[in-house]
Image (tube, grey):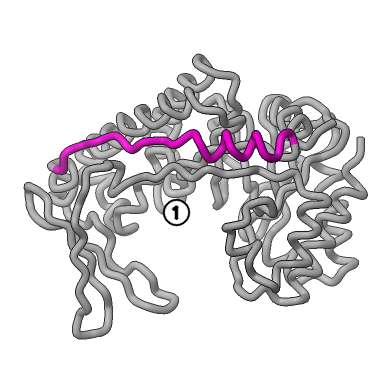
Amino acid sequence: MTSRDRVLTALRCQQPDRVPLSLFLNPYDADSAYVRDPSYAELMAACREYEDVFYNYYVPMGFLLTATPVETQVRQLPNGDTEYRVETPRGPLTSIYRSGARGEVKRWITEPVDIERWLSLPYVPVTVDHAPLLEARNRLGDRITTQVVMTDPACCTGWIAEETVALWTIEERGLLREFYDECFRRHMDLVEQVCAGPADVVYFNGPEYCIPPLMSPRDFEEFVVYYDTQLFALIRERTDKLIIVHSHGKVRHFLTQFRDTGLHGLNVLEPPPMGDVVLSEAKQLIGDTVCLIGNLQWSELMDASPDGVRRLVREAMDQGKPGGGFILSPTAMPYAFPLLPEHSRNLSLYLQYGHEYGAY
């Protein structure tokens, strides 16, 4: 069975020849920082040997979901922060970044008028370019699974300050719904284009913004399930592409709602204590219709001894493997440059042990 067949079989909740292994890395992308960095050389070799590679195309989301040309003014503030400013017909939008761990300290949208300013920008649909995945398929064949990566409307919550979102779910709910309605309309335009392209899989980020403690179960139903169900229905009606949804956080009590949106695969299924998903319970609850993707906690995997890596992989396989419909992956991808030798070792062992225990 080819790697692509293995992945698509698992996503259809069937049993392939072995459990697919994911590390969210692409060793076939010569432009990737991971491929170019010498500290990743050993791990890239292990990926080429063992990983079932998703070859990603990231949809360019434009400036707040429009391809309208905008001039961004940048200035240094007296305290050393950097302000980014965009003029709209209704007034300026600004965000502020602080170097170091703080990152963004002011989101683009902090007041109701900021939504009006965003809406006042002319809307030009972002263009999805099908050429990169066509080239990758022609070059690599079934060694890869081609995947379009994009957001869902809930992900646009990230433009708004967390405390503002929480307050607006109570005091400005109508405005918030207007905001999501427009985000949804623009996402439908993107999905229309994606449906016409060559990708095997469409991968959505975003629902984690709408689960507790930031939002309530009612908010999840209104701002995730309502919109995503329609997006996924369009994909299912038009194509045979498969759908993966990504969500960190404590999603245990939302598993059946995720299932009911019509997705095919759900990751990252974080285990306790960072999350609350016990893989065997999730398997029993939704595993007959949803491919479970996870659930090796990143920090635990990085800090483990070689024997500990073996134990983590084997335990996950014991819980997720029976009957198919399972893809083994960590809850995050490598992000450090350079990659520490002990982390390179553990991730390479993860792939080797996944191969060893993954056969059906």
Q: Secondary structure at mark 1?
A: loop
Viewer-closest of 142 and 236:
142
Against 342, residue 139 (above or below) is above
Viewer-closest of 205 and 337:
337
Badge count: 1
Which residue is drawn at the image coordinates 28% and 49% (left, top)? Answer: 63
Locate the N terminus by quadrant. top right
Residue 276 locus on image (x, y percent) = 63, 51
Locate the C terminus by quadrant. top right
Residue 253: quarter of image: top right
Which residue is drawn at the image coordinates 57% and 31% (left, top)? Answer: 199
Residue 359: quarter of image: top right
Which residue is drawn at the image coordinates 39% and 41% (left, top)? Answer: 154
Q: Is residue 29 left or right of residue 231?
A: right
Q: Is residue 226 left or right of residue 51?
A: left
Q: Which residues are magenta?
A: 121-142
Does the image show residue 284?
no
Q: Within 10 angstroms of label 1, few (less than 14), some, or many (20 or more) residues?
A: few
Q: Is residue 101 magenta?
A: no
Residue 86 locus on image (x, y percent) = 17, 57
Q: Is residue 101 left or right of residue 81?
A: right
Does the image show residue 358?
yes
Q: Is residue 129 left or right of residue 178?
A: right
Which residue is drawn at the image coordinates 50% and 39% (left, top)? Answer: 204
Q: Which residue is mark 1?
A: 213
Residue 336 locus on image (x, y percent) = 60, 71
Q: Is residue 126 magenta?
A: yes
Q: Amino acid at mark 1?
A: Pro
- In the image as oriented, which residue stretches furthest toward the top? 237
